[in-house]
Amino acid sequence: MTTEVSLNDPRDLSNDILRDLLKTTCEAHPWDGKFESLRKYHDYPVCNMWFAEDRVVFDGGTSIVRNVQLGENGSAKFTRPYEPASPTVVDVQGRLRAEWVQATADYSISRQEIMRNRGRERLISLVVSRRQAAMEDLANLLEDYAWQSPSGPADDLHPMGIPYWISPITAAQQTAQEYGHQGGNPAGFLNCGGIDCSDAANQRWRNYNDSWAQAGGEIGDDDIIKITRMLRRLRFRSPVFLNDIDGDSYRNLRLYTNEHVLESLEEYARLNNDSIGTDIGKYAGATVIKNLPVIWVEQLDADETNPLYAINHACFHPFVMEGDFFRETGPMNSRRQHDVFTTFVDLQFNFICTNRQRAGGVISRINL
């Protein structure tokens, strides 16, 4: 027969009993799936939008694999009665592939702290506060690397962030003043998600990009034209007789940039308020372009190319390994710290873009 022991029991409380009580408290009050009280950055667009319940895609296997339709099969034509058919089989599928990456955080509570926080409510408060600190740190890590690209094909430590999927303009494209869906393989990579964009057959697996008219990120009339043109060319609409799964995806379109470009846009809107029409303006204290708010991303402040991203969040998902979605292991202790109970939080995932053509674009400028 097992005897129930509480924190108020006058007998000696062994580490095993305290660990069981701590484990029971953790299991009874799991993380609610929300990142709260985040203080390091002013906004967390990736964590708050991509890790929403309806955005996460659970998967398995040794890697992430998805089929992508890269074009039509070329079979459509006009015919006459009794004209013989000559069907052909054309492979229009590409294979998107990405590797899993792992992220982890942990929080610890000592035996002494548990003893000093006797009582159910105080112990719950202690667990919640320590867990929240670990989750905040994990959120900072995820948000930071969502705005970065892996260093190269051999980098299996970091996820495929937005600059990996939304390739900025190259020096050659900028010199030639080219723009459009020309964002190919990320710099240093021979493919993007396993699909080689340099192949003409895979040209639809490219993102939109353009360059600012001026060096330094100052916004002028030509730049407003570039932004509105990018937004126009990111909108695709399917024929009415086709089931368009992304038909309502543009409500998830957002604009992101650094503080320098945002302030330039604000100054432009202020100085040209009477003549800019409806392209750019102010609404509820925010600068908006075509009714889309321009959001400051602190991770982009150090980027000297001054990028402005148009991101269609409907095309981005965190693919997560089933069973490794912020999985808690513990509490546990070791010989080196026998009175410290540590719980680990683990995530196995990668950031995946399912449609580069619709996913977004970027306007930036390389200092040549």
Image (cartoon, rainbow, N blue to C red):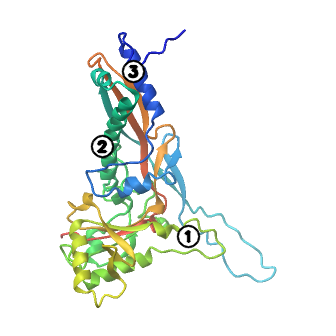
Give the distance between the C-alpha atoms of the residues marked 3 and 2, in whole angstroms. Answer: 24 Å
What residue is drawn where x is 27% and y is 19%?
337
Where is the N terminus found, in terms of image quarters?
A: top right
3D distance between C-alphas at marks 1 and 3: 51 Å
Q: Earlier in the sequence, mark 2 or mark 1?
A: 2
Secondary structure beneath label 3: helix
Q: Are marks 2 and 1 in contact (CB under 8 Å)?
A: no
The residue that label 3 is drawn on is: 19
The answer to whether one can see residue 365 in this image is no
Rendered-image quadrant of the C terminus:
bottom left
Amino acid type at circle 1 is: Gly
Determine whether the residue tagged by mark 1 lies in a helix, strand or loop.
Answer: loop
Instruction: Give x and y (percent) for residue 332.
Output: 37, 23
Q: Nearer the viewer, residue 100 or 34?
A: 34
Extreme-right residue of the structure: 82
Q: Which residue is mark 2?
A: 137
User: Which disc, if any, is residue 247?
Assistant: 1
Q: Quadrant of residue 274?
A: bottom left
Name which residue type carries label 3: Arg
Q: Is residue 331 left or right of residue 72?
A: left
